[in-house]
Image (spheres, grey):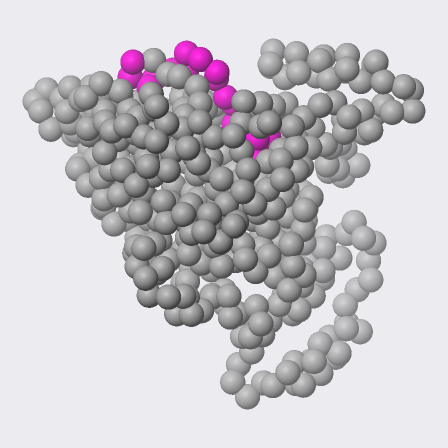
């Protein structure tokens, strides 16, 4: 237990001790004050590889990656946003005009180092890999706590490739995700083969029922069977029609842009259908040749990624707002770590976990364009440092979930966050 966690536990215990004897333990955790938002859904956009904060949402003095020697600093021009005093880089021009609906949390940091897999797991789960315990992702926790907003859709979906970091961990298969890669066809296996009509599907389910075990509610087999029943319930045209992007007006599809934009458009449709949490992966096809992991020459075409992100995010914000869904839908942008202000020998940037930017938009929060401040090369926080558990706690609180609530892993209580505290300035 580190100093921060210890002090957090002491504060919670002190507050709980002042409560009546009948309101301690789990009830005390519910009563200790946390802000409670009114968002109903979350779209979590994942930028795998490590987005450069200094080239996007936390720009500093102008640098130059192409000069010999290179000059440390932001590789692009800076522009003003809709929030006075807050600037982004030139390739986020559309998002900059919407900055009053956005908060770039500039002081996120962790000590998990700069290895992609470990940092990816940490930003998804809020905890380091530890022994045999597999911790649940933020998506699975939301699925567990809130369920789907409509029983005809799953609670949690991933538009991208499956990964254990995105999974339910000790919460069990029932709180896992359904994933897809192709936005046009939707998830595989939810459309019966040709010639299998609804009557035959129902008959097969009746034949399967006696073979299913009836283990205890806590058994892994029971979790699997529950997930299987949910999958069978979702199979068919009613769920699959959510993936018919051709039903959207051409002007809307065009506004969202290319392949990633269509993923964000699909996420909006899934929100409308009642899916509680959708993770959307960006840049699966490495359109700049290197993705967000911009070592060496990867920096040269980084602007293509940033522009694509800008187009899709701004379209998603304005589309949700036009449909009256922005205050009900929290958009979160995640990445495993950031990049240093200095360039490497090839003109790119290395890895940095000492400080980086994660972004929130919509969700009924009190946005301010940016939160927190970093030093002159965005290398360390100097004001309002935010841990990854704090960022998660902010997501949970925005969706009405108490970040101090305890889950149960093999009869052992595990708090939803590892001492995370919501960013109070974004509430109220």
Establish if 243 lies above or below 140.
below
Of 114 and 26, nearer the camera is 26
Position of residue 219 measured from the top left corner of the image (x, y, whole percent): 77, 52
Query: What residue is shown at x 66% (from left), y 11% (from top)?
Result: 7
Picture quadrant of residue 150 = bottom right
Query: What residue is shown at x 52% (from left), y 49% (from top)?
Result: 325
Establish if 138 lies above or below 219.
above
Establish if 97 lies above or below 421.
below
Spot the residue most to the left. Answer: 68
Position of residue 21 measured from the top left corner of the image (x, y, whole percent): 91, 20
> Is residue 229 in view?
yes
Query: What residue is shown at x 71% (from left), y 83% (from top)?
Result: 203
Magenta includes 379?
Answer: yes
| Quarter placement of the N terminus | top right
Decide if residue 2 is on the left or right side of residue 246: right
Decide if residue 166 is on the left or right side of residue 219: left
In the image, which residues are magenta? 376-395
């Amino acid at each position: 237990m580190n100093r921060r966690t210890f002090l957090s536990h002491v504060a919670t215990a002190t507050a709980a001790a002042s409560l009546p004897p009948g309101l301690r333990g789990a009830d005390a955790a519910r009563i200790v004050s946390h802000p409670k938002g009114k968002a109903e859904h979350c779209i979590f956009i994942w930028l795998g590889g490590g987005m450069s904060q200094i080239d996007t949402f936390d720009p500093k003095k102008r640098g130059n990656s192409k000069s010999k020697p290179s000059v440390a600093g932001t590789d692009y021009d800076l522009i003003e946003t809709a929030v006075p005093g807050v600037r982004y880089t030139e390739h986020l021009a559309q998002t900059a005009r919407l900055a009053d609906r956005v908060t770039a949390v500039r002081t996120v940091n962790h000590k998990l180092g700069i290895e992609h897999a470990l940092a990816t797991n940490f930003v998804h789960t809020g905890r380091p890999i530890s022994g045999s315990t597999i911790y649940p992702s933020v998506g699975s926790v939301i699925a567990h706590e809130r369920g789907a907003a409509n029983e005809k859709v799953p609670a949690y979906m991933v538009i991208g490739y499956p990964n254990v970091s995105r999974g339910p961990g000790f919460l069990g298969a029932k709180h896992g995700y359904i994933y897809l890669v192709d936005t046009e066809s939707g998830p595989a296996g939810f459309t019966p083969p040709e010639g299998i009509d609804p009557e035959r599907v129902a008959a097969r389910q009746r034949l399967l029922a006696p073979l299913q075990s009836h283990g205890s509610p806590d058994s892994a087999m029971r979790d699997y069977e529950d997930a299987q029943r949910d999958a069978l319930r979702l199979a068919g045209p009613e769920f699959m029609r959510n993936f018919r992007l051709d039903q959207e007006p051409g002007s809307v599809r065009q506004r969202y842009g290319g392949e990633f934009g269509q993923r964000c458009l699909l996420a909006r449709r899934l929100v409308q259908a009642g899916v509680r949490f959708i993770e959307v992966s960006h840049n699966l096809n490495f359109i700049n040749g290197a993705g967000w992991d911009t070592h060496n020459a990867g920096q040269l075409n980084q602007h293509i990624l940033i522009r694509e992100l800008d187009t899709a995010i701004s379209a998603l914000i304005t589309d949700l707002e036009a449909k009256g869904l922005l205050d009900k839908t929290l958009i979160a942008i995640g990445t495993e770590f950031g990049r240093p202000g200095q360039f490497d020998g090839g003109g790119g940037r290395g890895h940095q976990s000492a400080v980086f930017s994660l972004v929130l938009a919509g969700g009924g929060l009190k946005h301010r364009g940016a939160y927190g401040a970093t030093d002159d090369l965005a290398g360390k926080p100097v004001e309002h440092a935010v841990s990854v558990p704090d960022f998660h706690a902010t997501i949970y609180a925005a969706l009405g979930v108490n970040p101090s609530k305890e889950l149960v892993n093999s009869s052992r209580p595990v708090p939803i966050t590892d001492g995370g505290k919501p960013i109070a300035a974004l509430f109220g």
